[in-house]
Amino acid sequence: MTDPDPQPISTIVILDTHPVIRKGLARLLESNFETMQVIEAKNVAELGLAGTDLGRVLFIIIMNSDFEEDGTSPVFEVKAFNQAASIILYGEQTQPELVISYFKSGINGYLSKHKDLSELITCINTVVAGKRYVSADHMDFLFGYLIENYRTLKKKDLLTPRQNEIARYLMQGLFTSSIAEQTGLHISTISTFKAAIFSKLGIDNILKLKQILETGGN
């Protein structure tokens, strides 16, 4: 049953692998959202170690060049950490099919870094009010893309190159230990990759993964 009077968002969490950027953004948001707690961390794991009672949270995840390169999406990690959290992705403009997949995964807002701070404030206020947000120009871009490509959109295109590499090993029936040996990664990292791949593709077994990789399945 839906809570008719949900707890208001009381905390904004900035996740970014670059400390200077996230600390600077935190200071800017503190001056614009004085009634909210603004904290920052490198990732969800670092945040978990803080042991802070965050209340209802809005996460702002900064998308850098290393986004998802460790095998899993920060969106996946945030939802595992706090299923009820609201999420805004803020970063480099990425492939439209990926933006669509992120919304399907549970994000509430998407904004390019090329937008000014005032639009980020608008985005935050919109999400805090319980609505989704995409800037007008990017919405036109996404809408145009869907019109042109909806019938040929392939799930396999949602995977990063590293995720695709691991998916190919999984499709061959290799165990995580064998994949770890092939790639030089830890077994736990391979397991993280596998969970992220399954979550992103909306599947629960290797057979479905094989069908998607071989046919491009929609």
Image: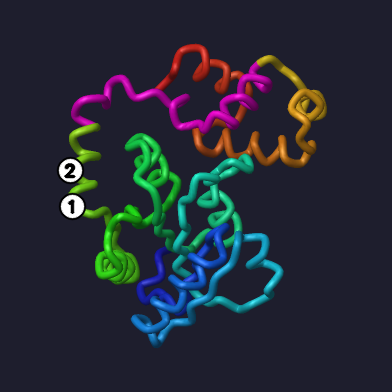
Q: Secondary structure at mark 2?
A: helix
Asked whether, in this view, residue 103 is left or right of residue 143, the answer is right
The N terminus - image quarter: bottom left
Hey, what amino acid is under mark 1? Ala
Task: Kindly identify the residue that appears in the image at 23 percent across and 32 percent down.
Answer: 145
Q: Residue at x 55, y 60 (%)?
A: 18
The residue depicted at 18 percent of the width and 34 percent of the height is 144
With 204 as the anchor, is 176 left or right in this view? right
Tell me if residue 67 comes above or below residue 165 in the rendering: below
Q: Are marks 1 and 2 in contact (CB under 8 Å)?
A: yes
Task: State the image coordinates of residue 96 (x, y, percent, origin top left).
Answer: 32, 37
Magenta region, mostly helix, strand or loop? Answer: helix
Residue at the extreme top: 214
Label 1: element kind: helix
Amino acid at dot 2:
Asp
Marking on residue 136? 1
Q: Is residue 177 above or below residue 33?
A: above
Q: Which mark is residue 140?
A: 2
Q: Residue at x 55, y 70 (%)?
A: 40
Instruction: Give the extent of the magenta segment.
Output: 146-171
How many residues crowd mark 2 within 10 Å: few (<14), some (14–19), many (20+)?
A: few
Quadrant of the drawing holding the C terminus: top left
In magenta stretch: residue 161: yes
Residue 210 on image: x %, y %: 57, 17
Which corner quadrant of the image does residue 155 belong to?
Answer: top left
Instruction: Decide whether residue 10 is among the magenta residues.
Output: no
Query: Is residue 115 depicted above or below 76 in this figure?
Result: below
The image position of residue 185, as x and y in percent, is 76, 35
Q: Residue 139, position in %: x, y?
A: 21, 46
